[in-house]
């Protein structure tokens, strides 16, 4: 019988054994938000869960996949129907309570893999707070697409690209093609001259950071041209992400 690696599929005795073995808990986090006219609202969680499953397969017995966080921090997408958002306070509380619950049972290392960039700042804050409240806990977090910059660059994406664009669509074509409505994919904002002055400044500079609502950046919520994406591009991006997260976990010593 194979050893389960998903916490929800374990018995309490199996969970106790996994914690005692010093496994790392992987927590997929996503969002429920618009992804343009051709991709589903749950795109970010689908990608995070897909990556986490592959990482877990690479490290049998070394990790446990904890409960997913399906809704994230998405106020910048609220102009588009179907989007649900948590406040940063609520999202932080959910992450913290997942971690502290499992810490009581003996786990000390946690990696949140987030498919949604809007969660990043809150994850950093939670990790900082845990240094004081739970010094025995090590909380790491990882984005997805930015780990595969070389694979994304190889796609030669649009001058403006990102949300629901070439790279994200490619990942979905690889991981969950049945959730991509290829006949409905549309280009969004693809060049700086399509942006207003404030939006152009925000996109030009990574730092200082300026947060804007997505309906100001793109009428259909898309940055880039998803019609140019292929499943092969997605496979290359996902492999780069999985390899880099796997390497990190392999090098992360027990607490």
Image: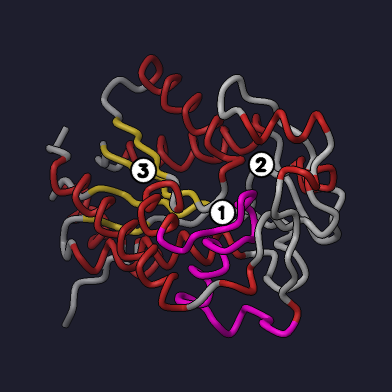
Residue 179: quarter of image? bottom right
Q: Looking at this view, is 118 or 159 the one in front?
A: 159
Count neighbours of disc 1 (C-alpha within 10 A) and say few if under 14, some if 14 to 19, many if 20 or more.
Answer: many
Residue 86: quarter of image? top right
Q: In this view, does 178 lie to the left or right of 132?
A: right
Range covered by the magenta-colored residues: 154-183
Q: Is residue 182 magenta?
A: yes
Disc 3 vs disc 1: which is toward the camera?
1
Residue 233 image offset from top left, x and y in percent: 43, 71
- Residue 186 lies, with reference to residue 99, above or below; the image says below
- Residue 226 lies, with reference to residue 199, above or below; the image says below
Pointer 1 or 2: first along the chain: 1
Quote the CA–CA distance across marks 1 and 2. 9 Å
Q: Helix, strand or loop at disc 1?
A: loop
Residue 169 image offset from top left, x and y in percent: 57, 68
Q: Is residue 35 left or right of residue 106?
A: right
Quote the CA–CA distance across marks 3 and 2. 23 Å
Disc 3 vs disc 2: which is toward the camera?
2
Find disc 3 in the rendering and name its residue. Answer: 102
Residue 116 image offset from top left, x and y in percent: 57, 49
Q: Is residue 164 magenta?
A: yes
Find disc 1 in the rendering and name its residue. Answer: 30
Q: Helix, strand or loop at disc 2?
A: loop
Mark seen at residue 73: 2
**Residues under numbered marks 3 and 1 in contact, where contact means CB atoms less than 8 Å apart:** no
Quote the CA–CA distance across marks 3 and 1. 20 Å
Pointer 3 or 2: first along the chain: 2
């Amino acid at each position: 019988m194979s050893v389960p690696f998903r916490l929800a599929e374990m018995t309490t005795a199996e969970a106790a054994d996994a914690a005692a073995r010093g496994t790392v808990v992987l927590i997929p986090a996503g969002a429920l938000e618009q992804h343009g006219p051709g991709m589903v609202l749950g795109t970010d969680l689908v990608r995070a869960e897909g990556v986490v499953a592959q990482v877990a397969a690479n490290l049998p017995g070394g990790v446990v996949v904890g409960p997913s966080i399906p809704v994230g921090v998405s106020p910048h997408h609220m102009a588009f129907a179907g989007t649900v958002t948590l406040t940063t306070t609520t999202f932080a509380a959910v992450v913290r309570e997942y971690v502290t619950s499992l810490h009581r049972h003996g786990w000390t290392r946690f990696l949140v893999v987030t498919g949604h960039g809007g969660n990043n700042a809150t994850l950093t804050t939670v990790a900082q707070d845990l240094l004081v409240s739970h010094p025995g806990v090590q909380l790491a977090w990882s984005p997805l697409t930015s780990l595969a910059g070389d694979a994304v660059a190889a796609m030669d994406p649009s001058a403006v690209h990102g949300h629901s664009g070439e790279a994200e669509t490619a990942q979905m074509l690889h991981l969950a093609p049945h959730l991509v409505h290829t006949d409905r994919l549309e280009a969004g904002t693809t060049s700086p001259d399509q942006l207003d002055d404030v939006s152009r400044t925000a996109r030009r500079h990574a730092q200082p950071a300026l947060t804007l609502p997505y309906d100001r950046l793109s009428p259909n919520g898309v940055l880039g041209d998803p019609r140019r994406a292929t499943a092969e591009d997605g496979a290359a991006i996902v492999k780069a992400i999985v390899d880099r997260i796997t390497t990190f976990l392999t090098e992360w010593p027990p607490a």
